[in-house]
Amino acid sequence: MQHFLEISQLTPAEISVLIQRALDFKQQFKLNQPLPQYPTYTMANLFYENSTRTRVSFELAAQRLEIQSVNLEIATSSAAKGETVLDTIQTLMAMGIQLFTIRHPEDGIVQNIADVIGDKACILNAGDGTHAHPSQALLDMMTIIETKPDVTQLKIVIVGDLKHSRVANSLQWICAQLGVKQLTLVAPDDWQPKHIHFGQVTAFFNESLHDADVIITLRVQRERFQTEDILDLSQYCRDYTLTPERLALAKPNAIVMHPGPINRDIEISSTVADGAQSVILQQVSNGVFMRMAMLASLVESAISASVKFV
Ligand code: NCD
């Protein structure tokens, strides 16, 4: 594989291999066993949008595999002087960087960059606009499989700002690829997506929770709102905040997830976010191992194809 752009480009077998690899890395790390090392590789983090979890976990993942890493501070880089993303990448490639983790507000830009770069470097999509966030979907599925290994028996509910959520888009693809039994996508009418790939859309949260094994809450992404998206937040909270009372409608062993960052008491109540059924911090730890699996697989395919980077 040359790039990680979206889940739709992975086969179910490739997804399973990545998840297993991430679980193996987690185990090896816990037991202090040696991990693969790729000291001749360098990764650059190019984040044109804010990030804590994704950026730090890619950086840590690289460090644990002895991949050197650099973080471009976009606000103080030449991007602020008008340099295009592609020119920035080609500049960094000329310095010997082979791996680029990119987050950008524009849908599809990561794919366009990969099309131009071809096999001269590896591009990883760390979230493009409202389009895709494949590493998040992979780490979410790893976390689900850790507690509930047979996903073909699961009912998964995703609730929140579906219209703006690249996380929900990538989750639809991964659920479809792995044959999840039922995916229910819950949002108020105004935030329902125009197109869905997999699952059923509903506005009725309480009803959707019946028999749910996994509930994934999404952040209300106010920074992406257009004027037509303005929604009465108190109304939203009344109908959609995941409260202990609502959680009790799901299966007793249901797990609660959130990609972060959380708006406490908007999409999820603090009691639920910090409660016994929450695996939110497990998602965060798994994020490092999943990104290690992604980086290792790109580096290893470059090594086996004897790719000569710039
Ligand atoms: C998500 C993102 O940036 O798309 N967060 C993340 O990567 N952990 C979701 C969000 O910002 O709400």
Image (cartoon, rainbow, N blue to C red):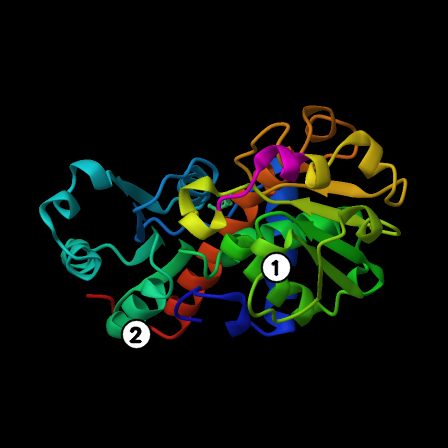
Is residue 182 left or right of 307 when viewed as pictured? right
Q: Which mark is residue 115?
A: 2
In this view, the residue in front, 57 or 270, is 270
**On the image, which quarter does residue 5 sit in?**
bottom left
* Marks 1/2: CA–CA distance: 24 Å
Q: Is mark 1 within 8 Å of ligand 1?
A: no
Which residue was labeled with disc 1?
Answer: 171
Tell me where residue 308 appears, x and y as whole percent: 25, 70
Tell me where residue 203 appears, x and y as whole percent: 71, 54
257 part of magenta stretch: no
Residue depicted at 17% across the width and 36% down the height: 76
Is residue 122 left or right of 308 when viewed as pictured? right
Residue depicted at 69% across the width and 29% down the height: 269
Please identify the residue farthest to the left as the structure is shown.
81
Q: Is mark 2 within 8 Å of ligand 1?
A: no
Which residues make up the magenta segment? 230-237
235 part of magenta stretch: yes
Residue 293 seen from this side: no
Q: Which sits earlier in the primary sequence, circle 1 or circle 2?
A: 2
Residue 182 seen from this side: yes
Residue depicted at 71% across the width and 35% down the height: 238
Q: Amino acid at mark 2?
A: Asp
